[in-house]
Image (tube, rainbow, N blue to C red):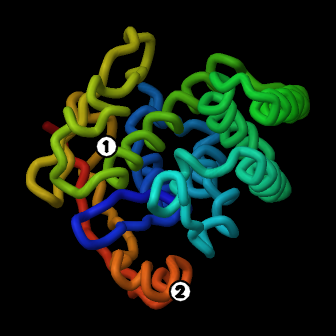
Amino acid sequence: MIVYEKENAYILIAQHEHARISGDLMSAWAAWQDQAGNMDPRLGDIIFAAYEHDRSWLDLDSWPLWNDKASGPYSFIDFPPKVRFLYYNKGLDEVQSTNGYAALLCSMLYTSLVEKFQDDDAVQFVNREYDRQNRIKQLFKVDEHQLRKHISALILCDGLSLFACMREPGTPRSEISWFANGFRYEPQGDKQEQQLFADWQGKSEIALDPFPFVQTVETVIIYKEVSKAEAAAIGLEAAYRKAELREHAIRFVSA
């Protein structure tokens, strides 16, 4: 669950909803067509990976849990690792049962986030996923250069979606610590890697510089606003189930 706090309420966004925004972005990625007009043969797999990369959270997000230490709902940042990794494996197995190359990308996204942690649970998870990745690479005879382009695009689309969801719309970039210094971006062709910057314009537009998409990307943030008073009175899970789904339309535009 993605969670941020307002004065009298918690905003909760299911991870699979954030992944949907990643998929909307990936569907508009400009680099999938080469100079000759040929589409990337893996395009369908890449877009599927973007939409499904947080399938692991579907069950976990169906019942939000209270974090006594933080005095608030558990988020994807502080969720207990042992349970998290168990469901990561389950979700990746489900993706792989449908699309092996998409599972490779999703697994690489997860290990890129987890491998910096050195506790036993993280190490075991990462080693299992490295084995999965190697098996899939051998099965599909993966082109490593193309794979690097694909995973870089997935990481960026994932990050841009998180930028949109992690704080209240309109929050200055400087106050979103993960992305205050921008995003790594690999342009089409052999151009050198550069930084991409995202900034809210009002509460409904995110301006990107440079702009990596073929057109303005219109999407929607789906969330629940859970009253703190109600969560205290009847419990977080009951208050979450009682809260109505809300939508907030946003656009990713060129700066």
Q: Position of residue 29 (x, y in %)?
A: 41, 41
Q: Which residue is mark 2?
A: 238
- Tell me if residue 204 comes above or below residue 105 in the rendering: below
Residue type marked 2: Ala
Q: Nearer the viewer, residue 31 or 129?
A: 129
Secondary element under disc 1, as helix, strand or loop, is: loop
Q: Amino acid at mark 1?
A: Val
The circle drawn on residue 214 is 1
The x and y percentages for residue 129 are 81, 34
Front residue of 189/192: it is: 192
Q: Residue at x 52, y 81 (%)?
A: 235
Name the residue: 71% across, 51% down: 84
Q: How far from the left and from the top, in percent, is residue 20?
A: 49, 60
Classify mark 2: helix, strand or loop: helix
Residue 124 in percent (x, y) is at 85, 32
Q: Is residue 78 visible?
A: yes
| Nearer to us in this view, 248 or 32 | 248
Give the crowd class for mark 2: few <14, some 14-19, many >=20 residues within 10 Å: some
| Dot placed on the residue nearer the N-terminal end, 1 or 2 | 1
Q: Residue at x 31, y 33 (%)?
A: 177
Q: Look at 16% across and 52% down and name the residue there.
A: 170
Residue 140 is at least partly visible in this image: no
Q: Nearer the viewer, mark 1 or mark 2?
A: 2
